[in-house]
Image (cartoon, helix red, strand yellow):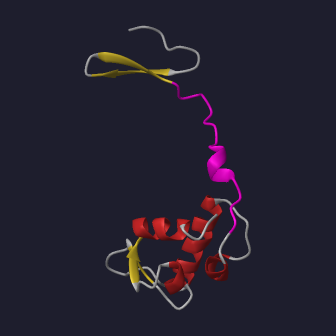
Amino acid sequence: MPSIPKYGIMLLVNKTLILTCAFMPRKANPALLKPLNVSATLEAVVGKGPMPRGQVVKKLWEYIKSHGLQDKVNKRNIHADAKLKPVFGGKDEVNMFEMTKLVSKHLG
């Protein structure tokens, strides 16, 4: 078996040698770090903007967990309260994947 290179790890998968770059640092995607303006309805939930998309989602989950809005049985579903209903387009319940799509309409 060949020696391990300085900046990677060799794996043997199905008799094929694969070189992985385990020691290379990942670069952050600048599009995800860009501060975006937050609509007034979303601002009532997450606070004053502008803020990056990741920060908006993080604060939204903090709000959902602190108010107990996550479904107890199916944790993918979120129940809307009075503040979240306008953000969710008037829906009473959305799943977490639909939530990110609906929230993106309030960022710009």
Position of the N terminus by quadrant: top left
Query: Residue 56 appears in which quarter of the rendering?
Result: bottom right
User: Residue most toward the bottom?
Assistant: 82
| Residue at x 46%, y 70% (from the top left corner) | 99
Q: Which residues are magenta?
A: 21-37
Q: Position of residue 88 (x, y in %)?
A: 48, 78
| Residue at x 41%, y 65% (from the top left corner) | 97
Tell me: 90 left or right of 26: left
| 57 within the magenta span | no
Does 39 sit above or below residue 44? Answer: above
Q: Position of residue 23 (x, y in %)?
A: 59, 28
Tell me: 108 left or right of 97: right
Of 4 and 60, the residue lying toward us: 60
Q: Position of residue 92 (x, y in %)?
A: 40, 86
Does 21 sit above or below residue 39? Answer: above
Tell me: 45 left or right of 100: right
Position of the C terminus by quadrant: bottom right
Of 36 and 9, the residue lying toward us: 36
Query: Residue 28 appears in which quarter of the rendering?
Result: top right
Q: Position of residue 107 (x, y in %)?
A: 61, 66
| 29 within the magenta span | yes
Does 69 sit above or below residue 1? Answer: below
Dominant secondary-structure state across the stretch colored magenta: loop
